[in-house]
Image (cartoon, grey):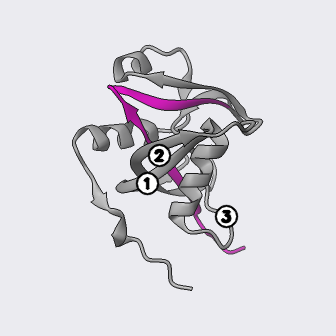
Amino acid sequence: MVWKPHVTVAAVLNNEGKYLFVHETSEDGPVLNQPAGHLEDNETLLDAVRREVAEETAYEFVPEYLVGIYQYRLPAGDKTYLRFCFTGQISGQRNIALDPDIIETLWLSREELDHQDICLRSPLVNRSLDDYERGQRLPIDLIHTIR
């Protein structure tokens, strides 16, 4: 068997001090996460994050910066995730049904997030928020798609 990481994208979206989260179902029960998901075949990272934000929140997302690239291995099992996290602007909202795993979308301050009874999907949620709040913004033109 050939090992390979699960490549994912995510978005940190802030509006007046509140961050956009999705309350979603997972194998371990309900969790909170940034809008995020897997890179699909023949898709760029930027296309993937725009699609995932739309599918999970109905918002149209315009990525402007890369917040960070994160490698995370699940404590139990053999899955490793390579996550590309972006930030940018919301340019509108679509009238579409959300992914079936989405329970609801929430705008929460960091303090409100810390007081939720719902578990975070992974430590990547807080780490990307920490990097965002520290002002970490990398130009997205660092990412090149060669076809």
Please name the residue shown 52% across and 54% down the image: 9
Would you place residue 3 above or below residue 91 in this image? Answer: below
Contact check, label 1 and label 2, Cβ < 8 Å: yes
Instruction: Pinpoint residue 113: horizontal percent, then vertical percent.
Output: 43, 21
Q: Is residue 42 above or below residue 93?
A: below
The magenta stretch is 1-24
Question: Badge 3 is on which residue?
Answer: 40
Task: Please say if 146 is above or below 66.
Answer: below
Residue 64 sits in which quadrant? bottom left
Q: How many marks?
A: 3
In the picture, the disc for residue 106 is: none
Mark 1 / mark 3, whichever is N-terminal: 3
Q: Is residue 32 left or right of residue 103?
A: left
Kindly identify the residue that appears in the image at 73 percent across and 35 percent down. Answer: 101
* Residue 11, numbered label: 2
Q: Tell me the quadrant of the picture where the N terminus can be found.
A: bottom right
